[in-house]
């Protein structure tokens, strides 16, 4: 009995033919409350848009207000596999390393000498390429320096289409994240990349280094420097064709058939060592494993 | 949140789900049996029959063997102690009741999410350091689960201890002294433990004893018993072997278990022991009653339904949305859990408990001890108070109220503190009257009370004589001295045949050798003995005119429900009764006729001073006050008129009949607002007739009611939808106390059983304290509403970030940890501080809450909290801060949309922002967590305005003022806590909260201001336009 009552109660709640109420409200009541909410939300949206507009007006078009979180620029390697920083392939199986070669090809295409000479300027090396604005007059668009693919020599992929992967001498390309206005290095000394074996944990309080397995390395350009002329960066809007400088590392006789953990860091006196937590600030680590048998 | 009502007297087996089980049926039948009247028949039997029935002897008593046999058969003569709930069950009830279930569900979902995530995570030991943050984010779910569990456990413990504390106070009320009884077995008097008394035992009781069992009196000498705890009658009643009434409760030849023998001695045969006694049946009836949920428990349940509904609806919507948008089912489940958790107001449970506790404490200060927390609010919802008369409305102390002498009625002072008006004490007649009253009086003060005020002193003697004693002591000084001056030489004590008491005294004047004979008794009897009357100190012959004056005065005083006594005296002529005359009181050898009538004195148990005012307040607060008493209708009506339960000018059917001089049957009952209903009539009423009485009369007095009828009255009121409070002190009230939505027992005069059955105890026995309770209860309901509105407003903005996160693919604006920081951190103190908020208007001038319409949480509150203030302030303020921080760091809103996949990709460490800069995962996550912190701070900033908004529901803040110091403290506290969480070193590791630039604190200011202005305007419209659209749609 009570169940029936409840049922009809529900039905009545949804549509009450006597009072012509739908869900406890008449049409005009629904109309009024909906109208109120529509007007109310339009007003709020307008207000939000207004405050957002005001906020956006306070922003500089060329430089973000705060950069304190980017004090130590990040470092990234190419080629990059899907999720992890692991480069694992088998020399005998073309498919396994061809992917890496293709990725590098694609990555390096914008650095082709023809494109660079067409778009960018040849700058004076070893000094910052400053293009300051004079007062309110913007010195835009700003020019960028050429970074020709040939600078990477053996790792440019021009002579060796496979970047040494098929012969167990892979190239890894390293780049430093762009940060507007950053002037790395100091006293005319360019920042440079060094790679070494990485300390890693194998058990509780047990650490290991793969120093003996890493073998010989060659850096391109020599010493693995990022030339000063590529700095400072003026931002996407002002410096449209900016070419990010790269450093390539070629492992000549790395131990095969074993995991080798490598860490590369940037060396520059005015780049603070990043926090322990951020393993990609000012350094990058990866695992290399070349299977031959 | 089940603060289970006190279960002390509850039978444990009634929770049987299967209605058809015979056990249940039997239980129900027993219950109905108990509601019927007592089936004692022994009073109608002759003594011999009774002896035969119990195989006992009227002189020798039982044999020891028989007694032992009966003891084994019937069990000990004691009330079965109420089944006590084990402590752990009580504790579990606190832990798993009501609201906690929601939180438990939340916690379990969190653990589930943790388990799912942990199981799907790659082997975490692979590279411990680098996975630190993976683990941290994974642990969030675990933390959340643990925190939720902790919240439930802590609040559970809190209310458990609160309850334990009040039950401890209860314990202190009991003083269990093993009771002794004097029985005659095998012809010898033996003192045995009252528990060993069995049916058929011959027992002897004397003045001051407690009756050990229900006994059929076989012989008595001036025995009087105080039945007030059983029947509510305030006068001691005499006991004799004769059956005087069919009703066992009314007849003279039965004395009841646990009532007190006031004076005299009696011998009787035990007819019922233990639970079979009348008292035992009432106690069992009480313990068998199921009590409904408290109104606040119902409200909170309703609230949980709404919240759960909203949570599940939103959760499922998001789940489906997530699946449609292409998230994996795992992610979708985690979203679902996140939404549900975000929807649970974690801190609310604690807030409600604390609010109720604070009020309970405040009430305890005002002498209302609350036994279970939820009862605090129940009193506020009360719409009907059924009050016992004796001891609750009255002082439970006979007091001289009126005197008639010199052909004039004088009013005596009946107030508790002697602040009332006095009468002319110079009249010689008065001096004579006082002398008669003092001398013809066996009552005397117990020793060692000289420092106490006269009214507080204990008296040995009968209630009327005590009243006279105190009255004389107050107006004429020491009665003892007067009695010493007038030595008593002879006395005839009161008996029911004479209906008077007389004594003969020497006179004060040493030279006067005459004897003074003083007499008091039933006025008509006393008048019969008189031939003259004292008027203005002069003896006058008692003519017809004076006799009529006497009759009128007698009728008038009797009509006031007062007990009237007549007084007369005579100075015996010296020639007939010379000094040393041997007065023989058995064979009266002296003059008892032609005395001189002095006056009348009438006594009543007067109402407490504060009661009329309190009743008036209840009435203006829309609460119906019904008097339910075991006393006589005339007395009950007089007191009801005295305290305003029947207000001036309102007539009963009988009054109308008397006024119009027509038979009662011709009066339209609808014309009479007041009604005095006799218990015997009540017995024959059908349920409909009962409802009719309760519905159609605003002022009702039930007289001569039995405990069972009290219960029926309470049930009748509840059937009509009223929330009923019952006040009472006696055992006879306890079933009603238990059945009522809130039972209020008296702390001083109340019996243990009544205190056990009650939810609240008035420590000062003052009915006026109930009014305070009602006021506090109403206030807490209003304030809880405000508190919930406040808490809920911060609840929904915790969901909107998820919404945008999933739909627009922006980085998550508010994390789980920050949600907890809001719910359990910054929101707590302000939410609790609202419990200290003063009332907005005179809450005692409005009608009681209608439990069906006025909900704690209604759709308007949800609409206001979720639809308006939230969106206006919190969500927009928080999102604004979020967009400001991201934009100032280089991520403009345009870039943000759709960035989520790359943003949360751990391997993407060169994510480009709007300016072309590149960010590592950790760098952008720090910015994201800074956004969470800013969102959190924005909510705090908007909560400033919100708490001020929630202070009032109708008034402007400028009318209400900012006098709530706790609230101001709360504002500073939440701000300080927010600053601490943001700036304290180490918080980045512990809670992932980062320091904010000072300018980011101000992002939410415009929104804070906006909601404040919006709400002030809304309230202004409500005040300007009562009943208008704004009020209908937004007044919660």
Image: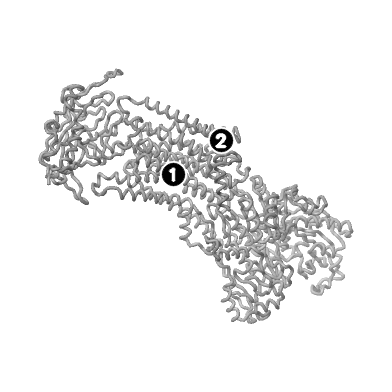
Residue drawn at the location 63% of the way across and 53% of the way down: B719
Residue drawn at the location 64% of the way across and 78% of the way down: B184
Q: Are marks 1 and 2 in contact (CB under 8 Å)?
A: no
Q: Chain of mark 2?
A: A
Q: Which residue is mark 2?
A: A27
Counting from the top left corner in percent of width and height, residue B115 is at 34, 51
Residue A292 disc label: none
Residue nearest the viewer, comparing B41 with B117: B117
Q: Secondary structure at mark 1?
A: helix
User: In the figure, A167 relative to B736: above or below?
Assistant: above
Tell me: B246 left or right of B288.
Answer: right
Q: Chain of mark 1?
A: B
Residue B343 disc label: 1
Counting from the top left corner in percent of width and height, residue B983 is at 35, 38
Residue nearest the viewer, comparing B998 with B139: B139
Residue nearest the viewer, comparing B851 with B278: B851
Residue nearest the viewer, comparing B57 with B789: B789
Q: Secondary structure at mark 2?
A: helix
Q: How many marks?
A: 2
- Compute the Cα span from label 1 to label 2: 31 Å
Residue B665's quadrant in the figure?
bottom right
Residue B473 visible from this viewpoint: no
Counting from the top left corner in percent of width and height, residue B955 is at 56, 36
Residue drawn at the location 51% of the way across and 49% of the way down: B301
Tell me: B713 left or right of B515.
Answer: left
Residue B617 visible from this viewpoint: yes
Q: Nearer the viewer, mark 1 or mark 2?
A: 2
Residue B1020's quadrant in the figure?
top right
């Amino acid at each position: 009995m009570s169940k029936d009552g409840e049922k009809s109660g529900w039905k009545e709640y949804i549509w009450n033919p006597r009072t012509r109420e739908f869900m406890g409200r008449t049409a005009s009541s629904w109309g009024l409350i909906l109208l109120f909410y529509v007007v109310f939300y339009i007003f709020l949206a307008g207000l939000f848009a207004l405050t957002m507009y005001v906020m956006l007006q306070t922003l500089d078009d060329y430089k973000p207000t705060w950069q304190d979180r980017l004090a130590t620029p990040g470092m990234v390697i190419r080629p990059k596999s899907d999720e992890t920083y692991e480069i694992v392939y088998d020399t005998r199986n073309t498919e396994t390393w061809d992917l890496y070669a293709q990725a590098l090809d694609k990555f390096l295409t914008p650095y082709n000498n023809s494109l660079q000479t067409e778009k960018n300027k040849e700058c004076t090396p070893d000094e910052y390429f400053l293009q300051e604005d004079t007062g309110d007059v913007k010195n835009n668009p700003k020019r960028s320096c050429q970074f020709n693919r040939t600078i990477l020599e053996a790792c440019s992929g021009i002579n060796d289409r496979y970047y040494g992967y098929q012969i167990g001498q892979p190239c890894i390309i390293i780049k430093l994240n762009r940060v507007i206005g950053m002037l790395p290095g100091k006293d005319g000394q360019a920042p440079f990349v060094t790679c070494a074996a990485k300390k890693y944990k194998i058990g509780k309080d047990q650490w290991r280094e793969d120093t003996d397995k890493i073998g010989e390395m060659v850096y391109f350009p020599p010493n693995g420097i990022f030339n000063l002329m590529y700095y400072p960066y003026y931002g996407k809007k002002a410096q449209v064709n900016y070419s990010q400088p790269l450093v390539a590392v070629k492992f000549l006789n790395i131990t095969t058939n074993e995991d080798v953990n490598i860490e590369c860091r940037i060396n520059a006196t005015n780049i603070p060592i990043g926090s322990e937590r951020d393993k990609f600030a000012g350094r990058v680590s990866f695992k290399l494993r070349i299977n031959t048998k | 949140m089940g603060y289970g009502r006190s279960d002390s007297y509850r039978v444990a087996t009634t929770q049987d789900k299967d209605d058809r089980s015979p056990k249940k049926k039997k239980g129900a039948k027993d219950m109905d049996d108990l509601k019927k009247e007592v089936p004692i028949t022994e009073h109608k039997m002759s003594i011999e029959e009774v002896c035969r029935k119990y195989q006992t002897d009227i002189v020798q008593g039982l044999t020891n063997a028989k007694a032992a046999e009966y003891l084994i058969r019937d069990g000990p003569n004691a009330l079965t102690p109420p089944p006590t709930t084990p402590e752990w069950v009580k504790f579990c009830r606190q832990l798993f009741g009501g609201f906690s279930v929601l939180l438990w569900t939340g916690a379990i979902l969190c653990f589930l999410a943790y388990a799912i995530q942990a199981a799907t995570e790659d082997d975490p030991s692979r590279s411990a350091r680098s996975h630190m943050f993976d683990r941290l984010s994974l642990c969030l779910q675990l933390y959340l689960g643990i925190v939720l569990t902790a919240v439930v456990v802590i609040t559970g413990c809190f209310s458990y201890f609160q309850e334990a504390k009040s039950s401890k106070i209860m314990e202190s009320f009991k003083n269990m002294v093993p009771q002794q009884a004097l029985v005659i077995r095998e012809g010898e008097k033996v003192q045995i433990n009252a528990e060993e008394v069995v049916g058929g035992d011959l027992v002897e009781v004397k003045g001051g004893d407690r009756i050990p069992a229900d006994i059929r009196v076989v012989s008595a000498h001036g025995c009087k018993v105080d039945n007030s705890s059983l029947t509510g009658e305030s006068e001691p009643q005499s006991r004799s072997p004769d059956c005087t009434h069919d009703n066992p409760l009314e007849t003279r030849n039965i004395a009841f278990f646990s009532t007190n023998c006031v004076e005299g001695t009696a011998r009787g045969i035990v007819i019922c022991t233990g639970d079979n006694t009348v008292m035992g049946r009432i106690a069992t009836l009480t313990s068998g009653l199921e009590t409904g949920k408290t109104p606040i428990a119902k409200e909170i349940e309703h609230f949980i339904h709404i919240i759960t509904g909203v949570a599940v609806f939103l959760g499922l919507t998001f789940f489906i949305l997530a699946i449609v948008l292409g998230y994996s089912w795992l992610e979708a489940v985690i979203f679902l859990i996140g939404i549900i958790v975000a929807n649970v107001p974690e801190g609310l449970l604690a807030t409600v408990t604390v609010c109720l506790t604070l009020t309970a404490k405040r009430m305890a200060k005002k002498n209302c001890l609350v036994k279970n927390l939820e009862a605090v609010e129940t009193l506020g919802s009360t719409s009907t108070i059924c009050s016992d008369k004796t001891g609750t409305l009255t002082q439970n102390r006979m007091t001289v109220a009126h005197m008639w002498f010199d052909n004039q009625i004088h009013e005596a002072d009946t107030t508790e503190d002697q602040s009332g008006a006095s009468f002319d004490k110079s009249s010689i007649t008065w001096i004579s009257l006082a002398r008669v009253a003092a001398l013809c009086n066996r009552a005397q003060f117990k020793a060692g009370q000289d420092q106490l005020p006269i009214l507080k002193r204990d008296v040995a003697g009968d209630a009327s004589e005590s009243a006279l004693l105190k009255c004389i002591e107050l107006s004429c000084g020491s009665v003892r001295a007067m009695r010493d001056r007038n030595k008593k030489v002879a006395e005839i004590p009161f008996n029911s045949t004479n209906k008077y008491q007389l004594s003969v005294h020497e006179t004060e004047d040493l030279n006067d050798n005459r004897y003074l004979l003083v007499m008091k008794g039933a006025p008509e009897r006393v008048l019969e003995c008189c031939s003259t009357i004292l008027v203005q100190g002069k003896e006058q012959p008692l003519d017809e005119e004076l006799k009529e004056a006497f009759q009128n005065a007698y009728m008038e005083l009797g009509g006031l429900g007062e007990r009237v006594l007549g007084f007369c005296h005579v100075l015996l002529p010296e020639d007939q009764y010379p000094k040393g005359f041997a007065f023989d009181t058995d064979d009266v050898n002296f003059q008892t006729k032609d005395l001189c009538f002095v006056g009348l004195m009438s006594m009543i148990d007067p109402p407490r001073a504060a009661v009329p005012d309190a009743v008036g307040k209840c009435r203006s607060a829309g609460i119906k006050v019904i008097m339910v008493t075991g006393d006589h209708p005339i007395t009950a009506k007089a007191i009801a008129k005295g305290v305003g339960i029947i207000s001036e000018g309102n007539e009963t059917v009988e009054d109308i009949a008397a006024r119009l001089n027509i038979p009662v049957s011709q009066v339209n009952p609808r014309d009479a607002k007041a009604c005095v209903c006799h218990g015997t009539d009540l017995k024959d009423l059908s349920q409909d007739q009962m409802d009719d009485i309760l519905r159609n009369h605003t002022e009702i007095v039930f007289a001569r009611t039995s405990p069972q009828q009290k219960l029926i009255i309470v049930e009748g009121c509840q059937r009509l939808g009223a929330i009923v409070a019952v006040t009472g002190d006696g055992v006879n009230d306890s079933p009603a106390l238990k059945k009522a939505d809130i039972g209020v027992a008296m702390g001083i005069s109340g019996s243990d059983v009544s205190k056990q059955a009650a939810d609240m105890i008035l420590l000062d026995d003052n009915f006026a304290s109930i009014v305070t309770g009602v006021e506090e209860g109403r206030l807490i309901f209003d304030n809880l509403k405000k508190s919930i509105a406040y808490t809920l407003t911060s609840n929904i903005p915790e969901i909107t970030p998820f919404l945008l996160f999933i739909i627009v693919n922006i980085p998550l604006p508010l994390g789980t940890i920050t949600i907890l920081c809001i719910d359990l951190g910054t929101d707590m103190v302000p939410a609790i501080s609202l419990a200290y908020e003063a009332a907005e208007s005179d809450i005692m001038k409005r009608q009681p809450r209608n439990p069906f319409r006025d909900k704690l949480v209604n759709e308007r509150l949800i609409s206001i909290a979720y639809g308006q203030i939230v969106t206006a302030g919190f969500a927009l303020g928080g999102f604004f801060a979020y967009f400001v921080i991201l934009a100032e760091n280089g991520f403009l809103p345009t870039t943000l949309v759709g960035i989520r996949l790359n943003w949360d990709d751990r391997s993407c460490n060169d994510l480009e922002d709007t300016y072309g800069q590149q960010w590592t995962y950790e760098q952008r996550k720090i910015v994201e967590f800074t956004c969470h912190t800013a969102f959190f701070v924005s909510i705090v900033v908007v909560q400033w305005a919100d708490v001020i908004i929630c202070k009032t529901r109708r008034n402007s803040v400028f009318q209400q003022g900012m006098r709530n110091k706790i609230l101001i403290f709360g504002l500073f506290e939440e701000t300080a806590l927010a600053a601490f969480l943001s700036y304290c070193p180490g918080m980045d590791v512990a809670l992932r909260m980062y320091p904010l630039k000072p300018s980011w604190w101000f992002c939410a200011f415009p929104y804070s201001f906006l909601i404040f202005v919006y709400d002030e305007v809304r309230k202004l419209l409500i005040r300007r336009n009562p009943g208008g659209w704004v009020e209908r749609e937004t007044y919660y």
